[in-house]
Amino acid sequence: MTTLTFSINKHSAILLLLLAAIPFFCSAEQLSKDKSYLNKISLGNANSWNFSSGSLQNQMVELFTSEGCSSCPPADRWLSNLKNSPDLWNNIIPIAFHVDYWNNLGWADPFSSRAHSLRQRIYRDQRYVNSVYTPGFVVNGSEWRGWFNRQSLPKETHENVGNLSLDVSHDGKKATFYAEFVRPGSPNSKTYRSTPSAKLSLNVAVLAMNQKTDVELGENRGKTLHHDFVVTNIQSVDLTEPSIVDEDNPPLSWSGELDLSQCQDCAISAWISAEGDQQPIQATGGYLK
């Protein structure tokens, strides 16, 4: 009688273990389709994240906008709708730069910065855009006017430009980041032929989500404006390590800190660019929540 009881309990335990494993395998199959979620849970820390671009070039979508511009709210809404895109953070990295050259027409945009206006002017000076205006879209460093004709974003290049990974941790006030960029070629073998590493820079921006402003003056007076992916803090870090073109291909790395005090609901983006050239080479990002 005792032997029979042990046998039943043993088989019951095995059955229960198999039943418990079924939802795990189902969940694992579903999670494998969501790269950003897998990256977050892999660290096992609620205040730490890892984002990775993959080797194929992502689309970095920059919007130059202003709360003082009556034509900008529709573009802001369009950018916000990218929150619902399945390509968000996997293939599309949206960023909103609020410019300051509308501030003297009655309403000072609280998110505006002279540095954002300068970024747009540098695109013009480097002949990536024809002129400075809002709303203005730049996709992977090139002017995109398709939004005005309700066109879809340009097709991805699918070019192998290298993998950018970003580790982020934060304590509620500041974010500490560490980034690595693995260029095309075989790691740690002398097959790399491209821009020397000393010519590459990392750019990291904190993005405020779900922002709302009641505009009292200017062209949008009396309106409540909503924004997402708004740059509130940005840092560029040069890579100063000596490099030659014919070299081993180790990961290039950067680290630093960013202020999170200006946003409660945040995302982060990072991109690589060459010295003297704003056009992004690769980009990644995600939510800090």
Image: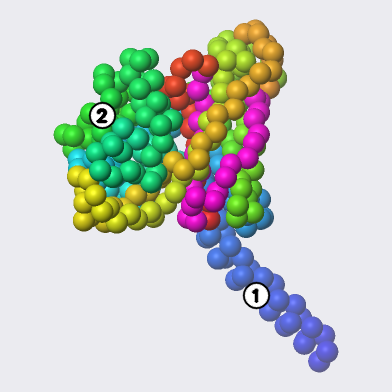
- Residue 267 counted in the magenta span: yes
- Residue 185 counted in the magenta span: no
Label 2: which secondary element:
loop
User: Which residue position is annotated with label 2?
Assistant: 133
Give the residue type at disc 2: Tyr
Q: Position of residue 176 (x, y in %)?
A: 64, 43
Closer mark to the observer between disc 2 and disc 1: 2
* Relative to 202, residue 68 above or below: below
**Label 2 vs label 1: CA separation?**
64 Å
Whichever of labels 2 and 1 marks the residue nearer the N terminus, that label is 1
Q: Position of residue 98 (x, y in %)?
A: 36, 38
Label 1: which secondary element:
helix
Q: Which residue sits at x=26%, y=21%? A: 131
Q: Quadrant of the N terminus?
A: bottom right
Q: Which residue sits at x=68%, y=79%? A: 12
Q: Nearer the viewer, residue 13 or 147?
A: 147
* Relative to 286, residue 270 above or below: above
Give the residue type at disc 1: Leu
Q: Position of residue 177 (x, y in %)?
A: 63, 40
Q: Nearer the viewer, residue 85 or 16?
A: 85
Highlighted range, magenta? 251-274
Q: Residues within 10 Å of mark 2 (few under 14, many from 20)?
A: some
**Which quadrant holds residue 185?**
top right
Q: Nearer the viewer, residue 9 or 175?
A: 175
Q: Which residue sits at x=21%, y=56%? A: 222
Label 2 with label 1: CB-CB less than 8 Å = no
* Relative to 152, residue 41 above or below: below
Q: Position of residue 251 (x, y in %)?
A: 66, 25
User: Which residue position is annotated with label 1?
Assistant: 16
**Which quadrant holds residue 6?**
bottom right
Q: Is residue 50 visible?
A: no
